[in-house]
Image (spheres, helix red, strand yellow):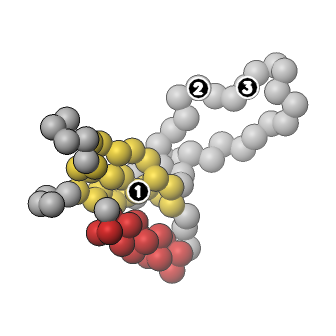
Amino acid sequence: MKFLQQGIRFYENYASISGFDTRLYSTKERKSDRKISLKYCVYNKEGFRETPRLHADCKKKRLITRMGCKARITLKMIND
């Protein structure tokens, strides 16, 4: 877990210097011992929303924030 946190901190620092924000996207665990094997940290505008927020009862219209950018880092646990 220590190295995972260091990897996330590294990408957040890199993003800050480069002028963009990040978010944690997904985590995969090993079935055998439920330990984290993969962690994805992505650009905050990565991907697209599944459903547009265009409901009639919506009081405030929100801007489209996801642009489909594929910037990400994958942190993979190789050995314990």
- Residue drawn at (19%, 35%) of the image: 31
Classify residue 20 as left or right of residue 75.
right
Mark 3 against mark 1, which lies toward the viewer?
1
Whether residue 15 is visible, yes or no, is yes
- Residue drawn at (32%, 69%) of the image: 2
What is the count of numbered marks?
A: 3
Cα distance in 3D space between marks 3 and 2: 9 Å
**77 in relation to 51, above or below:** below
Of residues 43 and 68, the one drawn nearer to the viewer in this rendering? 43
- Residue drawn at (47%, 70%) of the image: 12
Residue placed farthest to the top in the image?
56
Cα distance in 3D space between marks 3 and 1: 28 Å
Marks 3 and 1, the one that precedes in the sequence: 1
Residue denoted by label 1: 41
Q: Amino acid at mark 3?
A: Leu
Of residues 79 and 59, the one drawn nearer to the viewer in this rendering? 79
Asked where in the image residue 77 lies, by quadrant, the reply is bottom left
Residue denoted by label 3: 54
Residue denoted by label 2: 51
Marks 2 and 1, the one that precedes in the sequence: 1
Callout 3: 10 Å neighbours few (<14), some, many (20+)? few
Image quadrant occupied by the N terminus: bottom left
Q: Amino acid at mark 1?
A: Cys
